Amino acid sequence: MAAAEVTAGPAGDAPSPPADGAPADGPRSGVRPRPWRTGRPAGRRSPTGALTPWLFLAPALLLFGLFKFLPMARALEMSFQQVRPYLGDRWVGGANYQQVVTDDAFLAAIGHTVLLAVGQTGGSLVLGLLLALLLEGTARHLWIVRTAVFLPVVTAMAVVAEVWRILYHPAAGGAVNTLLGWLGLGPSQFLNGPDSALWSVMGVGIWRGAPYDMMIFLAALAGVDRTLYEASAVDGAGTPRRLWHVTLPALRPAFAVLLTLAAIRGLRVFTEIFLLTNGGPNGSTEVLMTLVYKLGLERNELGVAAAGSMVLLGATVVLTLALRARRGGGRPTGRAAAR
């Protein structure tokens, strides 16, 4: 019994190890606890665990397949055919695509689409940046102003179109024409004029898209290092120079994201045109999406409409990949990043 006891040294010294190799209280040194046995080699994933994420994704993938991927595949097939309901489709090869790239109506619609995309993208980025710079800060009630500015983004497009139709009333007593009269400018026909309709629709798109860009810019501005502003102010840099050399470089990632989203949104514009002008007057606001809609659902030229939609899809994919490549190519790597 005494052999198993731990002999203590002088007062304050650590107890000496037990005699005859008897174990001390607690686990022995160097003995690892037995791991929980799972019944399979360590590092191998369970088949059930590998299948679980796909089970959660299955409903969404099923819906995407039925309502997106299958219709896209069918549209690609139709773009090479003359679609004749109840009579059987006839293969025409690239005739539909040839009509898309040579027909005057399609060429005009493509030009209007590009002009509208460029104008709305640039205008919403500039206006969104100005709003973000004006509304940046930590003031107590600033969130109320930001919420009011952001309301056009969450408002239904049908409501927005009807409001702007009233504001664009072509008579001299219209809301916008009244403001122009105060500035000494004559009344405009806005949506009713072939020369002003496209620009009027572009103004609505900028007004609705700028608040969304503003919120992205506000999130990016929150991550700007404030010490850079203080250091540049100590060096004598004014507000314009601080904006150019500190703020804009810090917002470069936000610009890249917003440029991609706004460009795609501009190429796929449909609702604004459909509700405000429906392509008129005299086709001055006809874009590719509205023309495809009319050809497919009003004139029953489904093959040509499918070819036009494939052209728009290809342009969107090329634009997205080009912007992503441009964004990736602008990142410094290796020693350049370290410098």
Image (spheres, rainbow, N blue to C red):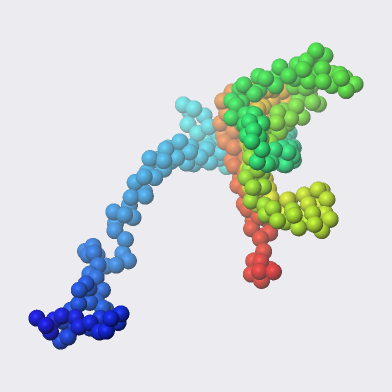
Query: On the picture, is 241 further left or further right than 2?
Result: right
In x, y percent, where is residue 59? 38, 40
Residue at figure coordinates x 84%, y 21% from the top left? 180
Q: Who is closer to the viewer here, 285 or 12?
A: 12
Q: Who is closer to the viewer here, 83 or 66?
A: 66
Q: Who is closer to the viewer here, 246 or 74?
A: 246
Which quadrant would the C terminus be assigned to in this image?
A: bottom right
Quick one: which residue is furthest to the front in this view? Answer: 11
Residue at figure coordinates x 68%, y 41% from the top left? 137
In x, y percent, where is residue 295? 61, 28
Q: Count of labels shown?
A: 0
Quick one: which residue is furthest to the right in this view? Answer: 184
Q: Measured along the vertical axis of the image, is residue 209 above or below residue 193?
A: below
Which quadrant would the N terminus be assigned to in this image?
A: bottom left
Quick one: which residue is furthest to the bottom in this view? Answer: 20
Q: Measured along the vertical axis of the image, is residue 236 above or below residue 172?
A: below
Residue 246 visible in this rendered orientation of the protein: no
Query: On the picture, is 295 further left or further right than 233?
Result: left
Residue 9 visible in this rendered orientation of the protein: yes
Q: Measured along the vertical axis of the image, is residue 147 above or below residue 54?
A: above
Quick one: which residue is furthest to the left in this view? Answer: 1
Residue at figure coordinates x 22%, y 73% from the top left? 27
In x, y percent, where is residue 93? 57, 42
Residue at figure coordinates x 73%, y 19% from the top left? 167
In x, y percent, where is residue 90? 52, 35
